[in-house]
Image (spheres, rainbow, N blue to C red):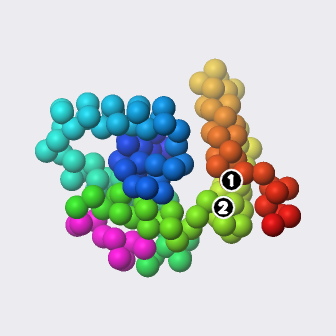
Amino acid sequence: MILGIQFRWILTHGKLARALVTTAELAIDDAKEAAWMDMYAHDSDTLEDVLYRRLQDLWAQVTDSIAVFNDNFAAQPLCVQKVWEALLTAFPLDHKRMQTALLARELTRMMSWDGDTKRAINLHFASVTELHHTMGFIGDPARSSAD
């Protein structure tokens, strides 16, 4: 998750991904990209490979996604952007199956409680906040069921 937050700018290059974030978030992503590329431009392939493998691990349970990873492999330039756009195309966030899978995963994370330290409490409520943000992408369930 931390890689996804810190390096979200890698995923927000494509048209579909850019539509999922606000203009202010895009400006932050663009600034993070510029700063990172100024310092580590020669390591961009390594970063692409790490995030590609992370996406592959996250999507491993969705067997339909295998075709996306077979078509967009790690040796390609900008492999993360290509596979992310392909995943968003094949599995749109407003698709009922995707909503169910996202909701189930996030509710499981939200309900798991690990410890009673201040850090554990902060992590738990950060998960709740993240779930709320994710639900904003999914939209109003009452409206979806009426469609």
Q: Are marks 1 and 2 in contact (CB under 8 Å)?
A: yes
Tell me, for residue 86, which label it has, or none. none
Secondary structure, mark 2, is loop
User: Quick check: can you spot residue 56?
Assistant: no
Q: Is residue 105 left or right of residue 87?
A: right
Q: Residue at x 42, y 43 (%)?
A: 8
Q: Which of the pair 103/32 is nearer the observer?
A: 32
- Report the residue that reaches farthest toward the top: 118
Where 57 sits versus 6, above or below? below
Q: Is residue 26 magenta?
A: no
State how far apart marks 1 and 2 are (Cα).
6 Å
**Residue topped by disc 1:** 138
Amino acid at pointer 2 = Asp
Secondary structure, mark 1, is helix
Residues packed near mark 1 inside 10 Å, few (<14), some (14 to 19) or many (20 plus):
many
Give the magenta part as a residue range.
Answer: 68-76
Q: Percent from the top left, x then y, of residue 38?
A: 18, 33
Q: Residue at x 64, y 20 (%)?
A: 118
Q: Percent from the top left, x then y, of residue 54?
A: 41, 56
Q: Percent from the top left, x then y, of residue 52?
A: 35, 58
Amino acid at pointer 1 = Ile
